[in-house]
Amino acid sequence: MQNLKLVAWLVFVALVLECLSRAASTLSDQLSAEGGDEWYIPSPSLGWTRRPNFSGIHSCATQANFDERGYFSADSHQIDDFSQQRVVFIGDSNTFGFCLDPPDTFVEVVDEQLPEASAINAAVAGYSSFQGYKTLLEYGDALKPDVLVVSFNFNDRRYVLDIGPDSNETFEQRYAARSRYEILQTLRASYFVRLLNFLLVKVGLAPERADPLSISVEGLAPRVSPEAYRQNLQNIVDWADERGVDVVLLLLGDNPTTTSALNRGIELLQAGDTVAAIDALRVASLDVVFGPLARKYLSEAYRSIGDTAKAEQVLRVKPLFSEQGGYPLYTDSHYHDIMREIARTNDVPVVNGDALLALTPGDYLDSVHFDAQGQRKVAELLLPTIRELLKQRR
């Protein structure tokens, strides 16, 4: 009898928590979208894309406005005007303008400083290099760039759980099974479902499974592997070369403040100073974004001193389920080296925005995005290269 009362009480508490969490989620969605739709829509070819005719909040209470084709409204007149040379930008949220009004993005600053040319922002928040290449296949010939500025890094390195790495098959399957995917996501977040599963396991009516709130970082795959990243960048360069378009590769990376302990730990581990490396990596493992990556190296350090139990333990993390992926599995420098390699192989310029922003870490808003001041610095860094390429084409 006492056990039944306890079960009833636990169920009641779970239902209350469920109601409160749903109410908070609903309120949050209403506030973030101002009672309207999200800024993006699902796409079977791109994963997701900007919602046509959207006008509302995108991030951090900043406004986004898209035209009937899904382009930024600020670019609409330029897209239809071929009287000027055109610079098209493809990239992720840093190019799109996370937590920034459109005039503050480096794309619009370039546009402001190049009155003789049109700068068009074709970036989408959350995009990987694979989605960048797919963007060109879908919109590139209509946009007809003279110069193409390319910047992808962070999203490529993020791990995937329910879905496979970025590919045509992954996007098509997710689009076809979107309703089922959303139901699974809802159930996974449900306090009531978690408690019910726990009780069924306890009374022997359900098999005990691995902790759904804990996964091992070891064995997780990124959205875009290093090999696939190299191929995607090469595909982008080849697309441009076939059409006589000049390419600029823009190298952007993580906030050096948030990755300092991680990078220090990796350096110490590679230098053979395992004890000091463990100290640094334990600190890095506490970071929400780069903690899983730090744990990969921390596990390696423990294994090197024979502590296999600790090595396994530190690999466990709370999973992040998201269409855009979880947290990074590689350092930014790993993918930077690939971008530089593609630049050398194809004789295209690479502009190092990462090194510039590292001089003023205060320009970062979080672990990867930078503010309006940082955006203007990146624009000023890009401008000489873009101007020279446009000049050569006249």
Image: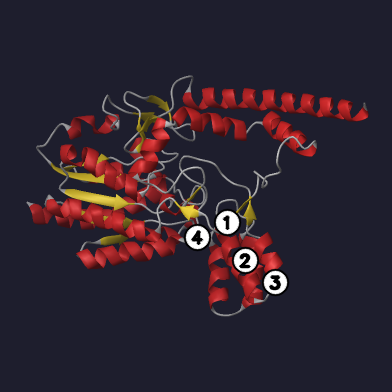
Q: Is residue 62 left or right of residue 110?
A: right
| Residue 226 x %, y % | 39, 60
Question: Quarter holding the N terminus?
Answer: top right
Real-space Cα separation, disc 1 to disc 3, in angstroms: 18 Å
Give SS at disc 2. helix
Q: Secondary structure at mark 4?
A: loop
Residue at position x 72%, y 31% in the image: 196
Q: Which mark is residue 226?
A: none
Whichever of callouts 1 and 4 sits on the residue coming sooner in the sequence is 1
Q: Can you tell which mark lies on residue 217?
A: 1
In the foreground, 50 or 355 = 50
Q: Which residue is mark 3?
A: 307
Q: Is residue 77 above or below residue 322?
A: above
User: In the visual, does 271 lie left or right of 252?
Assistant: right
Q: Which residue is mark 2?
A: 299
Sequence order check, earlier mark of 4 and 3? 4
The residue positioned 22% from the left and 42% from the top of the image is 137
Query: Nearer the N terminus, badge 2 or badge 3?
Result: 2
Disc 2 residue type?
Answer: Ser
Mark 1 or mark 3: whose residue is earlier in sequence: 1
- Density class for disc 1 (Cα within 10 Å; few <14, some 14-19, many ≥20) is many
Residue type at mark 3? Answer: Asp
Q: Earlier in the sequence, mark 1 or mark 2?
A: 1
Determine the secondary structure under disc 1.
loop
